[in-house]
Amino acid sequence: MEFNNARQSFFIRASLQPALCCLSFPNVYHRAKKNSIDLFLDVLMKQVVSVTQFDNERSFSINLESDWALLFKMHGSQSNVILMREQKVVSIFKNQFDADWDIDIKQLNRTVDWSKESFFQSQENLKTKYFTIGREFWEYLGKLDFESKSVDVKWDMFESTLAQLRAPKFFIGYTHHKATFSLLPISNIIDQFSDPIEAVNSFFQLATTESALEVEKKSLLKYLQEQIKNKKSFAERNERKLSELLNDQHYQLWGDLIMANMHLVKPGMESVTLTNFYNQEQTKIKLKKELNAQRNAEVFYRKSKNQQIEIAKLRESIIAKQKEIAALQKRIEEIEQTTDIRQLRKENEKAKPKKVTPLPYREVEFKGFKIWIGKSAEANDELTLRHSFKEDLWLHAKDVAGSHVLVKHQANKPFPKDVIVRAAELAAYYSKRKNETLCPVAVTAKKFVRKRKDDPVGAVVVEKEDVVLVKPQMV
């Protein structure tokens, strides 16, 4: 929001996101050219009359002339900005919060009894009693061993801490690994201010940068973890296949058994049962009946050799995937520690799947020639105006809506008559005349087709043409 006194501007930037409910006050603000809209048009150029901070409530209102007001409800994930007139809601920024339509501005001031007597009587429910005090306040007292103290000491600590809030310094640091703005000292302080606007602007910059960094990290980590999952799945499949091959070496055994019992294997036999000389069990072996014993054994030895090659390749593949997984895991560790948002954005851009723009045509090949058929009226324009050359052959069913068809030119090759007929059949099929017995189709060189400025989508002017009669058919 911009406020201007004809000499200078004052900006309020309100972040109402669940992850960052915060006001900041930039010196300049450049409005985005896209995805930007004016809000609360009723109060544009209205004069500011006053500002109301509601008692013990995370809300304030900017009061404008003619009894208009903008209510800022800074309630974390329920934050909103509400336009009011004569204390009635006119419009709300976040429309999903239906309850905000019923806000009664008279009820926003809330009473808290800060007396010593009330404090002494509320020992069992201090956090409920002093609802306006946030978690950071109680965490600060907790670090000072507040709970173990006597009631009198607790009161002194409570009053002393409230005094710090009434005349605060402003601390920026980290609590729970998150950027924090505090009016009380925190453990990991990275900066300290006496001016609240300077402080909150610095915090907002830190928090938004951190938030953007976290978004980039999450996106890239998700992609890398998906890559690890896919590579592990690939390696596991290969490990199962490898285990099966290592436990099944029968081709070598069958070859050895046949060579040891060549006198029992005769051409024409489809199988033979031989005694396994390792375990003395009977082993049935399927044979190629057109081969003799030695040739059958050679077949099994060749399969055994191929099996060993496959085993070696599987082992290489598993080792390669394990190295890739280790590299990805190392990169994940590096990303979790990095603060270089530019590098993360570059990696995220590379990781994004490339958008594949669908072609505006379907393709048929006939006798070495490519035939392109427009998919829609818009696609017809794109096909004819952007994907064609003047030497291409252009076809279209006469006097009805239908696809533009191109036969792509090949250097030093005239268009054969049967290729032209086939393209015409397709032009007829992809038109409103597809169910007619015969269809006239216009045939011309692309150089004789043009589009006028005000022609509707898919419409063109043909300056010179021949006509062929064909039966509409796709096959």
Image: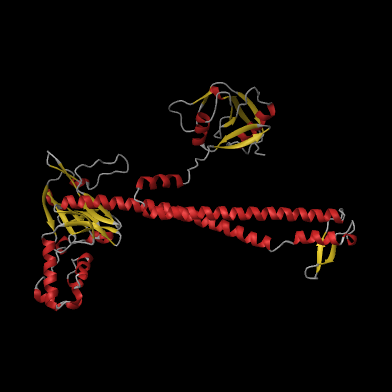
Apparent side of residue 251 relative to residue 272 in the rendered image (left or right): left
387, above or below 330, in the image: above
Q: Image quadrant for the C terminus?
A: top right
Q: Based on the displayed image, in which of its 4 quarters is residue 440 positioned?
A: top right
Residue 260 on image: x %, y % = 85, 61
Rendering colour mode = secondary structure
- The percent coordinates of residue 54 (x first, y second) are 14, 60
Give residue 462's position: percent from left, percent from top: 54, 24
* Count of labels in the image: 0
Of residues 249 and 273, the one nearer the viewer is 249
Residue at horizontal 57%, vertical 57%? 235
- Of 218 and 248, nearer the camera is 248
Q: Residue 8 is drawn in which quadrant?
A: top left
Q: Residue at x 84, y 60 (%)?
A: 258
Could you tell me residue 18's position as x and y percent? 29, 58
User: Relative to residue 115, is residue 366 drawn left or right?
Assistant: right
- Residue in view at x 12 percent, y 56 percent: 52
Q: Of residues 45 and 127, which is closer to you in this image?
A: 127
Q: Is 183 in front, or is 65?
A: 183
Q: Is residue 405 above or below residue 201?
A: above
